[in-house]
Image (cartoon, rainbow, N blue to C red):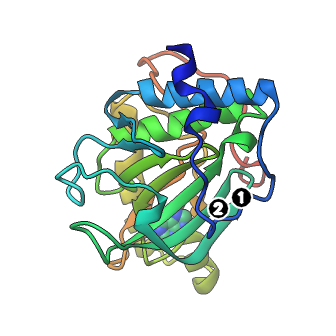
Amino acid sequence: MAGMFDLELHDAPDPEFISDDEGPTADLDTTLNVTEIEEQFRQQGPLGVSGEHIETLEISENTVNPGKVKAGPQDFELLKVLGKGGYGKVFQVRKITGKDCGSIFAMKVLKKATIMRNAKDTAHTKAERNILECVKNPFIVDLIYAFQTGGKLYLILEYLPGGELFMQLEREGIFMEDMACFYLAEITLAIEHLHGQGIIYRDLKPENILLTTQGHIKLTDFGLCKESIDEGLMTHTFCGTIEYM
Ligand code: ADE
């Protein structure tokens, strides 16, 4: 069983369109860590379904992918880069296979080697995937597919054409009171929903709020969330984005 998740046996080449700047992670420690993280991802509930080369993970229920068709990087055509961060990149992609062929998504690509340098990043990545899988709410970005290759983790999220609330704020300079009330009301509903599920969202900022075509908000980026919070209990971690503290 131990060898089952060995990278050497199951490592599929990553698609060429997303270059791996850091080359292969061949040393023993990293290999073991990658093996661990793959196993953990696989054990985390209904997302864990193994494929032949590419380990494919799917969410149990969603409207875009009701037939639970497996997906991998080869099912998506890269359109443009939407964002970059320490974690990896977010691309705009088009699905080129299956029932949802032609649909546009946001693809968040995380490098396992980068995530695993830091135990906290590993935990944050797992938290993000867990939360996005479980939480379904009109004001929270929807996870459509999740899968992995030997070197990368992929989250396929609904694409939000309105971009970041941050950009909207930059364009407008300030929000009029009615606009601010509208956004705040929707953000409150999103946060309230998370709290109802025992999740604390700890990185609230306009960069993490995306807009739909109709101008509604959706929270994204769940890497800093804390899960399984009991009512009345305090959490003391100092975290978030320095500029907003
Ligand atoms: N940037 C980061 N995530 C995004 C998403 N889901 N839709 C549009 N732009 C994004």
Is residue 180 visible in the rendered image? The answer is no
In front of the other: 94 or 174: 94
* 238 relative to 128, above or below: above
In front of the other: 153 or 72: 72
- Distance Cα–Cα, label 1 vs label 2: 6 Å
Kindly indicate the quadrant of the structure image that contains residue 218: bottom left
Q: Of tags 1 and 2, which is closer to the observer?
A: 2
Return the residue at label 1.
85
Would residue 178 be found to the left or right of residue 20 on screen?
A: left
Return the residue at label 2.
89
Q: Are marks 1 and 2 in contact (CB under 8 Å)?
A: yes
- Residue at 70% over, 23% down: 32
Instruction: Please provide percent x and percent y for residue 137.
Output: 29, 50
Residue farthest toward the left in the current orientation of the protein: 67
Does mark 2 have its CB less than 8 Å from ligand 1? no
Instruction: Please provide percent x and percent y for residue 54.
Output: 47, 46
- Residue at 60% over, 39% down: 224
Is residue 234 visible in the rendered image? The answer is yes
Name the secondary structure under disc 2. strand
Label 2 crowd bin: few (<14), some (14–19), many (20+), radius 10 Å: some
- Residue at 64% over, 80% down: 170
Name the secondary structure under disc 1. strand
| Residue type for callout 2 | Lys
Does mark 1 have its CB less than 8 Å from ligand 1? no
| Residue type for callout 1 | Gly
* 128 relative to 29, above or below: below
In front of the other: 242 or 90: 90
- Residue at 61% over, 74% down: 81
Residue farthest toward the front in the current orientation of the protein: 9
